[in-house]
Amino acid sequence: MNITSIGDLARGMTLRTRATDIKTQIETLSYEMSTGRVQDVSGRLGGDYSQILDLDRSLARLDAFGIATSEAALFTNTMQLSLKTFGDSVGDMTASLLAYGTANQPVNHEQASQQAKNELDTMISALNTRVGGRSLFSGTATDVSPLQSSNDLLTALKSQLTGLATVADIRLAAENWFNDPAGFDAVIYQGSNSTLSPMQISENESVTLPITATDPAFKAALRDVAVAALATDSALALSPDQRTALFTELGVDLANAQDATVKLRAKVGAAEARIEEAATRNSSARTSLEFSRNELIAADPYETAAKLQTVQFQLESLYSVTVRNANLSLVNFLR
Protein backbone atom coordinates (compact mmCIF):
# COMPACT_ATOMS: atom_id res chain seq x y z
CA MET A 1 0.00 0.00 0.00
CA ASN A 2 1.34 3.49 -0.93
CA ILE A 3 1.70 6.22 1.70
CA THR A 4 1.08 9.92 1.18
CA SER A 5 4.06 11.43 -0.58
CA ILE A 6 6.06 14.48 0.46
CA GLY A 7 4.71 16.14 -2.69
CA ASP A 8 1.13 15.70 -1.48
CA LEU A 9 1.98 17.27 1.87
CA ALA A 10 3.72 20.22 0.24
CA ARG A 11 0.83 20.73 -2.15
CA GLY A 12 -1.64 20.65 0.73
CA MET A 13 0.40 23.18 2.69
CA THR A 14 0.60 25.46 -0.34
CA LEU A 15 -3.16 25.30 -0.83
CA ARG A 16 -3.83 26.14 2.83
CA THR A 17 -1.40 29.06 2.72
CA ARG A 18 -3.03 30.36 -0.42
CA ALA A 19 -6.49 29.98 1.13
CA THR A 20 -5.40 31.98 4.18
CA ASP A 21 -3.98 34.70 1.95
CA ILE A 22 -7.19 34.95 -0.06
CA LYS A 23 -9.33 35.04 3.09
CA THR A 24 -7.18 37.91 4.38
CA GLN A 25 -7.73 39.79 1.13
CA ILE A 26 -11.47 39.20 1.39
CA GLU A 27 -11.52 40.54 4.95
CA THR A 28 -9.57 43.63 3.89
CA LEU A 29 -11.77 44.30 0.87
CA SER A 30 -14.95 43.67 2.88
CA TYR A 31 -13.78 46.22 5.48
CA GLU A 32 -13.04 48.74 2.74
CA MET A 33 -16.45 48.13 1.15
CA SER A 34 -18.31 48.64 4.44
CA THR A 35 -16.34 51.67 5.70
CA GLY A 36 -15.36 53.30 2.42
CA ARG A 37 -11.77 53.64 3.72
CA VAL A 38 -8.61 51.77 2.92
CA GLN A 39 -7.42 49.45 5.66
CA ASP A 40 -3.75 50.12 5.03
CA VAL A 41 -3.74 53.85 5.80
CA SER A 42 0.04 53.99 6.18
CA GLY A 43 0.50 52.47 2.74
CA ARG A 44 -1.94 54.94 1.15
CA LEU A 45 -0.21 57.93 2.80
CA GLY A 46 3.27 56.65 2.16
CA GLY A 47 3.93 56.77 5.88
CA ASP A 48 3.38 60.57 6.03
CA TYR A 49 0.59 61.27 8.52
CA SER A 50 1.17 65.03 8.84
CA GLN A 51 -1.70 66.10 6.59
CA ILE A 52 -4.29 63.79 8.11
CA LEU A 53 -3.17 64.68 11.65
CA ASP A 54 -3.61 68.37 10.83
CA LEU A 55 -7.11 67.64 9.54
CA ASP A 56 -7.90 65.65 12.69
CA ARG A 57 -6.80 68.56 14.90
CA SER A 58 -9.00 70.95 12.95
CA LEU A 59 -11.94 68.55 13.22
CA ALA A 60 -11.38 68.20 16.98
CA ARG A 61 -11.47 71.99 17.37
CA LEU A 62 -14.69 72.17 15.37
CA ASP A 63 -16.18 69.40 17.53
CA ALA A 64 -15.37 71.49 20.60
CA PHE A 65 -16.97 74.54 19.03
CA GLY A 66 -19.98 72.40 18.12
CA ILE A 67 -20.49 71.59 21.78
CA ALA A 68 -19.90 75.24 22.74
CA THR A 69 -22.44 76.58 20.24
CA SER A 70 -25.02 73.99 21.31
CA GLU A 71 -24.61 74.99 24.95
CA ALA A 72 -24.66 78.70 24.08
CA ALA A 73 -27.81 78.22 21.98
CA LEU A 74 -29.55 76.37 24.79
CA PHE A 75 -28.50 79.06 27.27
CA THR A 76 -29.70 81.98 25.13
CA ASN A 77 -32.90 80.25 24.02
CA THR A 78 -33.85 79.56 27.63
CA MET A 79 -32.93 83.12 28.58
CA GLN A 80 -35.20 84.37 25.80
CA LEU A 81 -38.09 82.28 27.12
CA SER A 82 -37.49 83.62 30.64
CA LEU A 83 -37.50 87.20 29.38
CA LYS A 84 -40.74 86.54 27.52
CA THR A 85 -42.38 85.20 30.68
CA PHE A 86 -41.09 88.19 32.64
CA GLY A 87 -42.25 90.64 29.98
CA ASP A 88 -45.69 89.05 29.68
CA SER A 89 -46.21 89.46 33.42
CA VAL A 90 -45.14 93.10 33.23
CA GLY A 91 -47.51 93.66 30.31
CA ASP A 92 -50.46 92.04 32.09
CA MET A 93 -49.75 94.01 35.25
CA THR A 94 -49.46 97.27 33.31
CA ALA A 95 -52.90 96.84 31.73
CA SER A 96 -54.48 95.79 35.02
CA LEU A 97 -53.05 98.69 37.06
CA LEU A 98 -54.17 101.24 34.50
CA ALA A 99 -57.66 99.69 34.55
CA TYR A 100 -57.87 99.38 38.33
CA GLY A 101 -56.50 102.88 38.73
CA THR A 102 -59.68 104.30 37.20
CA ALA A 103 -61.95 102.39 39.60
CA ASN A 104 -61.82 103.88 43.07
CA GLN A 105 -63.27 100.78 44.73
CA PRO A 106 -61.62 98.83 47.60
CA VAL A 107 -62.56 95.47 46.07
CA ASN A 108 -60.80 96.41 42.84
CA HIS A 109 -57.79 97.61 44.77
CA GLU A 110 -57.57 94.28 46.58
CA GLN A 111 -57.76 92.45 43.25
CA ALA A 112 -54.95 94.60 41.87
CA SER A 113 -52.68 93.88 44.83
CA GLN A 114 -53.42 90.17 44.70
CA GLN A 115 -52.64 90.04 40.98
CA ALA A 116 -49.43 91.96 41.65
CA LYS A 117 -48.37 89.33 44.20
CA ASN A 118 -49.05 86.56 41.70
CA GLU A 119 -47.20 88.32 38.87
CA LEU A 120 -44.27 89.14 41.15
CA ASP A 121 -43.92 85.46 41.97
CA THR A 122 -43.95 84.62 38.24
CA MET A 123 -41.38 87.32 37.45
CA ILE A 124 -38.97 86.15 40.14
CA SER A 125 -39.40 82.53 39.06
CA ALA A 126 -38.56 83.55 35.48
CA LEU A 127 -35.33 85.21 36.63
CA ASN A 128 -34.47 82.17 38.77
CA THR A 129 -34.63 79.84 35.76
CA ARG A 130 -31.82 77.32 35.39
CA VAL A 131 -30.60 75.38 32.39
CA GLY A 132 -28.14 72.52 32.62
CA GLY A 133 -27.80 73.21 36.34
CA ARG A 134 -26.73 76.83 35.69
CA SER A 135 -28.66 79.93 36.71
CA LEU A 136 -29.22 82.34 33.84
CA PHE A 137 -29.20 85.66 35.67
CA SER A 138 -26.73 85.13 38.55
CA GLY A 139 -23.62 86.33 36.73
CA THR A 140 -20.66 84.06 37.40
CA ALA A 141 -22.38 82.55 40.47
CA THR A 142 -24.29 80.11 38.27
CA ASP A 143 -24.67 77.62 41.11
CA VAL A 144 -27.18 79.77 43.03
CA SER A 145 -30.56 81.26 42.16
CA PRO A 146 -30.21 85.03 41.76
CA LEU A 147 -33.28 86.14 43.75
CA GLN A 148 -34.90 85.20 46.99
CA SER A 149 -38.66 84.54 47.04
CA SER A 150 -41.36 87.12 46.37
CA ASN A 151 -42.39 86.89 50.04
CA ASP A 152 -38.86 87.82 51.10
CA LEU A 153 -38.89 90.76 48.73
CA LEU A 154 -42.26 92.04 49.96
CA THR A 155 -41.25 91.66 53.60
CA ALA A 156 -38.02 93.60 53.07
CA LEU A 157 -39.71 96.34 51.04
CA LYS A 158 -42.62 96.64 53.47
CA SER A 159 -40.25 97.57 56.27
CA GLN A 160 -39.04 100.49 54.13
CA LEU A 161 -42.52 101.77 53.31
CA THR A 162 -44.34 101.35 56.61
CA GLY A 163 -45.40 104.65 58.16
CA LEU A 164 -45.06 106.75 54.98
CA ALA A 165 -48.09 108.93 54.40
CA THR A 166 -48.01 109.98 50.75
CA VAL A 167 -47.81 108.25 47.40
CA ALA A 168 -44.74 110.30 46.51
CA ASP A 169 -42.94 109.29 49.71
CA ILE A 170 -43.76 105.61 49.14
CA ARG A 171 -42.52 105.65 45.58
CA LEU A 172 -39.34 107.55 46.50
CA ALA A 173 -38.55 105.18 49.37
CA ALA A 174 -39.06 102.15 47.10
CA GLU A 175 -36.84 103.65 44.42
CA ASN A 176 -34.10 104.49 46.92
CA TRP A 177 -34.13 100.98 48.41
CA PHE A 178 -33.92 99.29 45.01
CA ASN A 179 -31.07 101.59 43.94
CA ASP A 180 -29.15 101.39 47.21
CA PRO A 181 -26.32 98.80 47.05
CA ALA A 182 -27.24 97.91 50.63
CA GLY A 183 -30.89 97.49 49.65
CA PHE A 184 -32.23 95.16 46.96
CA ASP A 185 -28.78 94.11 45.71
CA ALA A 186 -27.61 93.07 49.16
CA VAL A 187 -30.83 91.75 50.67
CA ILE A 188 -32.60 89.99 47.76
CA TYR A 189 -29.97 89.42 45.05
CA GLN A 190 -27.83 86.35 45.73
CA GLY A 191 -25.81 86.18 42.53
CA SER A 192 -22.44 87.62 41.58
CA ASN A 193 -21.65 91.19 40.60
CA SER A 194 -19.38 89.76 37.89
CA THR A 195 -21.10 88.97 34.61
CA LEU A 196 -20.58 85.76 32.66
CA SER A 197 -17.41 85.41 30.61
CA PRO A 198 -17.81 85.56 26.82
CA MET A 199 -18.90 82.28 25.22
CA GLN A 200 -16.46 81.23 22.49
CA ILE A 201 -18.47 80.01 19.50
CA SER A 202 -15.80 79.88 16.79
CA GLU A 203 -12.07 80.35 16.27
CA ASN A 204 -12.31 84.15 16.35
CA GLU A 205 -15.80 84.90 17.63
CA SER A 206 -17.45 85.02 21.04
CA VAL A 207 -20.80 86.10 22.46
CA THR A 208 -21.27 88.13 25.62
CA LEU A 209 -24.51 88.36 27.61
CA PRO A 210 -23.81 90.60 30.62
CA ILE A 211 -27.35 90.40 31.99
CA THR A 212 -28.04 89.70 35.66
CA ALA A 213 -31.15 89.98 37.84
CA THR A 214 -29.87 93.40 38.98
CA ASP A 215 -30.34 94.89 35.51
CA PRO A 216 -32.15 98.25 35.82
CA ALA A 217 -35.00 97.01 33.61
CA PHE A 218 -35.67 94.07 35.95
CA LYS A 219 -35.35 96.13 39.12
CA ALA A 220 -37.72 98.83 37.87
CA ALA A 221 -40.38 96.26 37.00
CA LEU A 222 -39.94 94.28 40.23
CA ARG A 223 -40.08 97.51 42.25
CA ASP A 224 -43.34 98.78 40.76
CA VAL A 225 -45.11 95.42 40.92
CA ALA A 226 -43.94 94.91 44.52
CA VAL A 227 -45.26 98.36 45.51
CA ALA A 228 -48.59 97.50 43.85
CA ALA A 229 -48.69 94.27 45.86
CA LEU A 230 -48.23 96.23 49.09
CA ALA A 231 -50.58 99.09 48.20
CA THR A 232 -53.55 97.62 50.08
CA ASP A 233 -51.50 96.43 53.06
CA SER A 234 -52.75 97.93 56.33
CA ALA A 235 -49.20 98.91 57.26
CA LEU A 236 -49.26 101.56 54.54
CA ALA A 237 -52.72 102.86 55.50
CA LEU A 238 -53.42 104.45 52.12
CA SER A 239 -56.85 105.87 51.37
CA PRO A 240 -58.82 104.65 48.33
CA ASP A 241 -57.92 107.84 46.47
CA GLN A 242 -54.23 107.36 47.21
CA ARG A 243 -54.36 103.76 46.07
CA THR A 244 -56.05 104.81 42.84
CA ALA A 245 -53.38 107.42 42.19
CA LEU A 246 -50.60 104.97 43.07
CA PHE A 247 -51.91 102.27 40.74
CA THR A 248 -52.19 104.76 37.90
CA GLU A 249 -48.61 105.99 38.33
CA LEU A 250 -47.26 102.46 38.63
CA GLY A 251 -49.11 101.39 35.49
CA VAL A 252 -47.57 104.21 33.47
CA ASP A 253 -44.06 103.49 34.74
CA LEU A 254 -44.44 99.76 34.15
CA ALA A 255 -45.15 100.48 30.50
CA ASN A 256 -41.65 102.01 30.31
CA ALA A 257 -40.18 99.02 32.16
CA GLN A 258 -41.84 96.74 29.61
CA ASP A 259 -40.09 98.62 26.80
CA ALA A 260 -36.76 98.13 28.58
CA THR A 261 -37.46 94.39 28.84
CA VAL A 262 -38.17 94.28 25.11
CA LYS A 263 -34.74 95.81 24.48
CA LEU A 264 -33.13 93.08 26.58
CA ARG A 265 -34.95 90.47 24.51
CA ALA A 266 -33.63 92.12 21.35
CA LYS A 267 -30.08 91.94 22.73
CA VAL A 268 -30.47 88.23 23.50
CA GLY A 269 -32.07 87.69 20.08
CA ALA A 270 -29.03 89.23 18.39
CA ALA A 271 -26.79 86.84 20.34
CA GLU A 272 -28.99 83.90 19.30
CA ALA A 273 -28.63 84.88 15.64
CA ARG A 274 -24.84 85.11 15.91
CA ILE A 275 -24.66 81.72 17.60
CA GLU A 276 -26.81 80.14 14.90
CA GLU A 277 -24.68 81.69 12.15
CA ALA A 278 -21.47 80.48 13.82
CA ALA A 279 -22.91 76.97 14.19
CA THR A 280 -23.77 76.94 10.48
CA ARG A 281 -20.29 78.09 9.49
CA ASN A 282 -18.65 75.55 11.79
CA SER A 283 -20.81 72.78 10.36
CA SER A 284 -19.91 73.75 6.79
CA ALA A 285 -16.22 73.85 7.66
CA ARG A 286 -16.47 70.44 9.31
CA THR A 287 -18.16 68.95 6.24
CA SER A 288 -15.38 70.32 4.04
CA LEU A 289 -12.62 68.96 6.29
CA GLU A 290 -14.28 65.55 6.54
CA PHE A 291 -14.49 65.41 2.76
CA SER A 292 -10.78 66.24 2.46
CA ARG A 293 -9.88 63.63 5.07
CA ASN A 294 -11.99 60.96 3.39
CA GLU A 295 -10.40 61.74 0.04
CA LEU A 296 -6.99 60.93 1.50
CA ILE A 297 -7.93 57.45 2.70
CA ALA A 298 -11.04 56.66 0.65
CA ALA A 299 -11.37 53.26 -1.03
CA ASP A 300 -12.83 53.36 -4.55
CA PRO A 301 -16.11 51.42 -4.23
CA TYR A 302 -16.15 50.16 -7.82
CA GLU A 303 -12.52 49.05 -7.77
CA THR A 304 -12.97 47.45 -4.36
CA ALA A 305 -16.10 45.60 -5.47
CA ALA A 306 -14.30 44.28 -8.57
CA LYS A 307 -11.34 43.10 -6.52
CA LEU A 308 -13.63 41.47 -3.99
CA GLN A 309 -15.45 39.58 -6.73
CA THR A 310 -12.13 38.44 -8.17
CA VAL A 311 -10.70 37.11 -4.91
CA GLN A 312 -14.01 35.43 -4.06
CA PHE A 313 -13.79 33.62 -7.40
CA GLN A 314 -10.19 32.71 -6.61
CA LEU A 315 -11.25 31.26 -3.27
CA GLU A 316 -14.01 29.21 -4.88
CA SER A 317 -11.54 27.92 -7.48
CA LEU A 318 -9.03 27.10 -4.77
CA TYR A 319 -11.64 25.12 -2.86
CA SER A 320 -12.44 23.19 -6.05
CA VAL A 321 -8.78 22.38 -6.55
CA THR A 322 -8.41 21.40 -2.89
CA VAL A 323 -11.38 19.04 -3.09
CA ARG A 324 -10.08 17.51 -6.32
CA ASN A 325 -6.63 17.07 -4.82
CA ALA A 326 -8.07 15.46 -1.70
CA ASN A 327 -10.08 12.99 -3.81
CA LEU A 328 -7.04 12.03 -5.86
CA SER A 329 -4.98 11.56 -2.70
CA LEU A 330 -7.68 9.28 -1.29
CA VAL A 331 -7.69 7.19 -4.48
CA ASN A 332 -3.89 6.87 -4.29
CA PHE A 333 -4.14 5.83 -0.69
CA LEU A 334 -6.71 3.11 -1.43
CA ARG A 335 -4.71 1.56 -4.28
Image: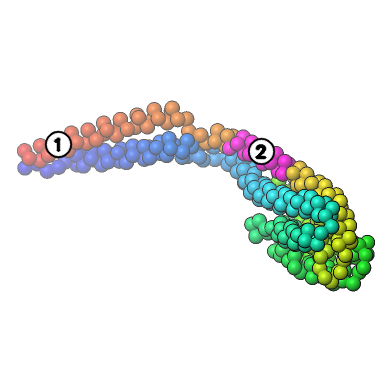
User: Mark 2 and mark 1: span between their CA atoms?
Assistant: 67 Å
Q: Which residues are magenta?
A: 272-290
Q: Amino acid at mark 2?
A: Thr
- The residue drawn where x is 21% and y is 42% is 9
Which amino acid, by three-letter code, is at mark 1? Answer: Asn
Q: Position of residue 297 (x, y in %)?
A: 52, 36
Q: Give yes or no for residue 286 being in the magenta stretch.
A: yes
Q: Residue at x 58, y 37 (%)?
A: 290
Type of secondary structure dominating the magenta stretch = helix
Expressed as whole percent of the image width and height from the top left, the position of residue 91 reads 77, 50
Q: Which residue is mark 2?
A: 280
Mark 1 neighbour class, 10 Å CA radius: few under 14, some 14 to 19, many 20 or more: few
| Among the two numbered marks 2 and 1 on one chain, the one whose residue lies closer to the N terminus | 2
Badge 2, how many Cα within 10 Å: few under 14, some, many 20+?
A: some
183, 209: nearer the viewer: 183
Quarter of the rendering containing residue 12: top left
Secondary structure category for the residue under label 1: helix
Secondary structure under the numbered disc 2 in the rendered image: helix
* Closer-to-camera residue (37/245): 245
Which residue in the protein does label 1 denote? 327
Horizontal arrangement in the rendering, residue 323 relative to residue 84 (left or right) = left
Q: Are marks 2 and 1 in contact (CB under 8 Å)?
A: no
Nearest the eye: 26 or 203: 203
**Could you say which quadrant of the image residue 47 lies in?**
top right
Q: Quadrant of residue 219?
A: bottom right
Residue shown at the point (74%, 44%) measured from the top left: 269
